[in-house]
Image: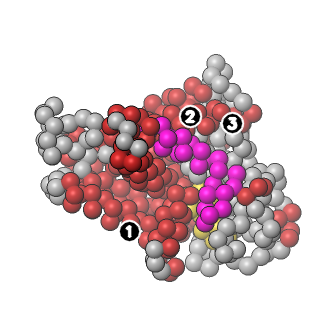
Amino acid sequence: MKKRNRHSTSQLLNFTQNSYLDRTSRPIYAIIFLLPFIIFYEWGTIWINTDLLNQSQVRVVAFVWLQNLLEYLGSSDKLAWVAPPVAVVVILVALQLSSRKPWGFSLGDLWRMGIECILLAVPLIVFSLFLNSPTGPQDDMGRFDENSTRLCRGSGLVVCASRLDSGFGLNDPSVTGNNLSSTAMKIGSGRENPIRNSTMTNAIHYVKSPAVGSSDAERLNSNGVQNGMFSNSITSKSLLASIVTGIGAGIYEELVFRLILICVLMLLFQDVLRLTHKNSIILSVLVSAGLFSAHHHIVLVNGQLALSAAFNWTEFGFRTVAGVYFAVLFAIRGFGITAGTHAFYDIIATIINAAFFSSAI
């Protein structure tokens, strides 16, 4: 390690200049490394929803938050789907400019970053398995349900991405945030309705088509899932849907809850409330982690608040710990590695569930 200087990338540690750890903490590396993930998320969303342009779309909640903010700031509705990924790139370019770091990058570092992200996801996988082990904390939320790849109690991972289907219609405009967990939530102008999401990857489903008839709403079960929508085996499309939403969560949740929220909280605690730097960091990490976990249970979209998943302490605690883990990782390794680790956690968890526990669905 070298003494702290303006070329130090990390907020907590200072790496030897131009070493692998120093290079890959730069914003330019985050852009290059995450660009394939961003493209895959957009492509996957369109592929999963073949009627995307005419009827519906599946999006991560954090993506929608960013999308709504950009629309409020004047972004065109026609470009709403591309504005968030462009915003990610613009933010990272601005950080690269302000950091005065070298713009050069080595493509050979990218595969090493991928391996690092996978290795950094392993502790969360292990912790998740522990929470669902026979000796770990258990509750009724540990079992599979029809719209989630969560594992049976005592045999699998706490958190994974939801499987979403674009062929889903809701026609009840009276549904509000008070009963989202049983049906759906009306948001915005009334033309969009997000349905119930899962855990780590908080995704919502928009239905933009006209009402399709009361029969669709009548076929909803208590979890807001259309009966018969999902087969007993995980299809390739449902598996891809979970992977796509997991990748989207990795990028946009880390952007909102780490890159943006922690910076805002640091300004609040340190500059406004005049707390010490150390206390500001601790509070920012804890508050951002708590909000990160809470947003998987309570959804705020277009100014409306709604319950999106039943609360239980095991899942809330896991995601809070994961939020602290991601925050520390962000401070040490930067945005690219943190977002990649989050995405790979969701990918690995989804694949493990599909490979070893699909029979429990």
Q: Judging from the image, what secondary structure is the residue with disc 2 in? A: helix
Circle 3 Cα neighbour tier, 10 Å, few/some/many (<14 / 14–19 / ≥20)? some
Q: Position of residue 214 (x, y in %)?
A: 86, 70
| Mark 1 secondary-structure assignment | helix
Query: Badge 2 is on which residue?
Result: 318
* C-alpha span from label 2 to label 3: 10 Å
Residue 179 occupies quadrant = bottom right
Q: Is residue 74 left or right of residue 147?
A: left
Amino acid type, callout 2: Phe
Q: Is residue 305 magenta?
A: yes
What stretch of residues is rendered in magenta? 285-307
Q: Earlier in the sequence, mark 1 or mark 2?
A: 1
Q: Residue at x 18, y 43 (%)?
A: 8
Type of residue at label 3? Asn
Q: Residues within 10 Å of mark 1 (few under 14, many from 20)?
A: few
Check residue 237 for magenta coloring: no
